[in-house]
Image: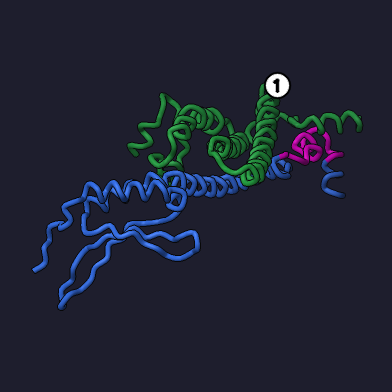
Chain colours: A blue, B green
Amino acid sequence: MENCQFVDQNIEPRTKAVERWIATHRDELSCQGAVVATYRSYRGRKLGPYFRLTYRGGDGRQRSLYLGASAELAHHVRQLLQECQADLRERRERHRLRQLLRRELKKTKALWRDELSKLGLRLQGYEVRGWRGAPRAQTRAPGKVIQSAGV
Amino acid sequence: MTQASNLQDGNARLPHWILNNVDFERFPAGLRAAVVEVLAPAYHELVERARDGLAKSAGMTIVWLMWLEIVDHVQLTENFTTPRSVAQVSEEREQLINRHLRLVGSKVKASAFLVRLHEFEQKHGSMPGCSGSVGASPGPAADEAEEVEG
């Protein structure tokens, strides 16, 4: 029968050791790394979860730090990882927001262009051009209309 | 909806699409404050109080440009405060500053149009073709052209 209780009685020193390890690998973990739960089977029974901190080393190889069966320790390590990766998440969120804003800007600019075209004006970049053929010509200076219409 | 109501300040309302597409809880505090203190009043002034479609669309464009400007401010601040190697920082910083200057330039151009439109409306009433044509144009180039022709 499997012992479902956490068997390692020395969780405090282990936690301290993991914290020290994370502190020394902070740069590597600032943009990657995750706590994963793994299971193994013994005589047809599924045992676990056993937790590991997986990350990719400087040489590009996948590595892992075994955390044990303590869900408490795994949760604590997840929190530490989140702290390490806070900047990364913020950068991603900002990038996503920027893309969204650029899409909205494109739509709005198209609306603005449409409104300007009703008046015979056009948008070049963010500058409004075509004042010479603008509404004034339609009402006051018919000569200008003829010129702008190319007649 | 609660996020938005927390951010609303007096009569100033947030741009309508924010509720659907953006999660404010994930923004840094500085960015959230900027949205409430700068963007919401600007949206109210330039979009909601706009008299016609032309002013509204130009105002909307300026508001989105302001949004991008604020996001860039946050990114520039981070770039200036994060310790990194000189070579890495200088190239990235140059790109960010150039992008920011282009953005500010675009905003100035769009704002200049809106200012010109407001000046024209104060002088002559509304823009011809928008509502109540008065037969004049806000473009100085058109004035000059007529003088030359006259």
> Could you say whether the residue bearing mark 1 is in a helix, strand or loop?
helix
Up-down relation of residue A61 to residue B118 (above or below): below
- Quadrant hosting residue A119: top right
Asked if residue A50 lies left or right of residue A91, the reply is: left
Residue A8 visible: yes
Q: Residues within 10 Å of mark 1 (few under 14, many from 20)?
A: few
Q: Residue furthest bottom?
A: A43
Q: Amino acid at mark 1?
A: Lys
Asked if residue B83 lies left or right of residue B145, the reply is: left
Up-down relation of residue A150 to residue B111 (above or below): below
Residue toward you, B2 or B77: B77
Asked if residue B112 lies left or right of residue A88, the reply is: right
Residue plotted at (21% across, 59% down): A69
Residue toward you, B91 or B34: B91
Q: Where is residue A41 shown, x and y percent of the image?
A: 20, 74
Residue B99 visible: no
Q: Residue furthest top?
A: B123
Q: Where is residue B92 shown, x and y percent of the image?
A: 63, 45
Up-down relation of residue A60 to residue B84 (above or below): below
Chain for disc number 1: B
Asked if residue A39 lies left or right of residue B150, the reply is: left
Tell me which secondary structure the magenta stretch mostly adopts.
helix
Reading the image, the residue beneath label 1 is B123
Residue plotted at (54% across, 49% down): A99
* Image quarter hosting the C terminus of chain B: top right
Q: Where is residue B110 shown, x and y percent of the image?
A: 66, 35
Q: Magenta span has A131?
A: yes
Residue plotted at (75% across, 30% down): B136
Q: Where is residue A105 shown, x and y percent of the image?
A: 58, 45
Q: Magenta span has A64?
A: no
Q: Which residues are magenta?
A: A127-144
